[in-house]
Image: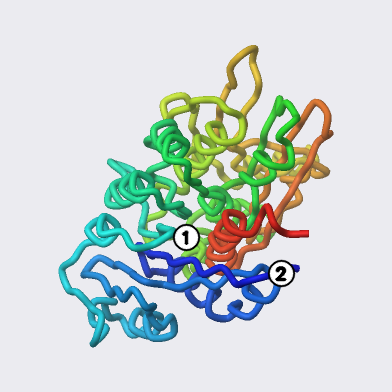
Amino acid sequence: MATGEIRRVTFLLIGAGNVGRRFLNLVESKRATLRERLGLDLLLVGVADSSGVARNSDGLSLPEIVALKEDGRSVSEQPRWGVPGETGLEMVQAGGADLLVEASPANMVDGQPAMGCIVAALSGGMHVVTANKAPLVLAFPRLAELAQARGVQLRYDATVTGGLPAVNIGQRDLAAADIYRLEGVLNLTTNYILTRMAQDGLSYEDALAHAQAAGHAETDPTLDVEGWDATNKLVILANSVLGYPAKLDDVEVTGITGVGEDALRAAAAEGKRIKLVATAEADGDRYRLTVRPTALPTDHPLAQLGPKQMGIVFHTDINGSISAAIVEDTPTPTAAAVLRDVVEIYAGAGRS
């Protein structure tokens, strides 16, 4: 239980889409809990989307910002505090906040605009919590070194398995362990497709259509089904948890488009289930990194995942083998992971 005075934390938000909007809803709905249990008062002083910003040093109304976005409008249309045309980077560079929450769409080409915003925030002495994979995949060592040099924290647990604390488990709970093997079903779309194909006898095309209709797959699912989303997440885990400076080129990648009904039936006949598994296997002073469809025994923790689940298994020298999984129907658990990282920055050391 937090004691003493309430600590006010001012924050900026880049990106008010599915995750960013839900994060604001969580901050609003959990306001009493954050104050009474953790001694935190989170105050939004600036928010940016692709059309502009809204900013007020005395705080913005979270329900009002959420309502604007749910109505399909820009935050810059806030009648008093909106600034059309101003970029998120300009807002960050102006400072005036303790924390940047970065939840813009991932751009895997150059990481922008998130990359510039994160660099500016860290350079300016702000803590950063991000749900955006791209900057970490493209420049993890640079960003980690910058955060350390500036004496601030860069947190990103939401980038790997949504609400499942995969990064936190590896970094914090297994800090004294050597992880000699890491396995994960890190992509929900492919797990949904493969599970529905195996359990319900659907074709790949029908399973993909079901995933899209349920909101578990993008209109263009290429990054997911060809294995690149899982690869991005494996690169982040390698850098952050394993301390291994991996890049995308270090991963052997095979997607699920070549997995047909015959392969699934053959695996079932052998008592196995096919999942798209991201693996990091220790090999001397390096790790071998792969993402590929893998036939797992049915008693393997990852084989038991349902269509709306992701999971991870850490094999260690002193902590045994630890597995964790999550059911994630909506982006809310991912937004909750962002909030969890904020709490860890400001209240983690002081909780009893």
Visible in this render: residue 201?
Answer: no
Mark 2 neighbour density, 10 Å: few (under 14) some (14–19) many (20 or more): few
Label 2: which residue? 3
Q: Does residue 23 sit above or below 120 in this rendering?
A: below
Q: Is residue 242 or residue 211 the one in the foreground? A: 242
Picture quarter with the C terminus? bottom right
Question: Residue 212: x, y in percent?
Answer: 47, 65
Split into 4 quadrants, where in the image is the N terminus?
A: bottom right
- For the point 73% across and 59% down, the residue is 351
- Of marks 2 and 1, the one in the foreground: 2
Q: Residue furthest top?
A: 284
Residue drawn at the location 44% of the way across and 47% of the way down? 133
Please name the residue shown 41% across and 47% down the image.
223
Q: Quadrant of residue 336?
A: bottom right
Q: Position of residue 264 (x, y in %)?
A: 65, 44
The numbered disc on residue 217 is 1
Looking at the image, residue 91 sits to the left or right of residue 324; the answer is: left
Q: Residue at x 55, y 36 (%)?
A: 240
Between 314 and 189, the residue placed more toward the observer is: 314
Type of amino acid under label 2:
Thr
| Element under disc 1 | loop
Looking at numbered disc 1 in the image, what kind of residue is underneath it?
Ala
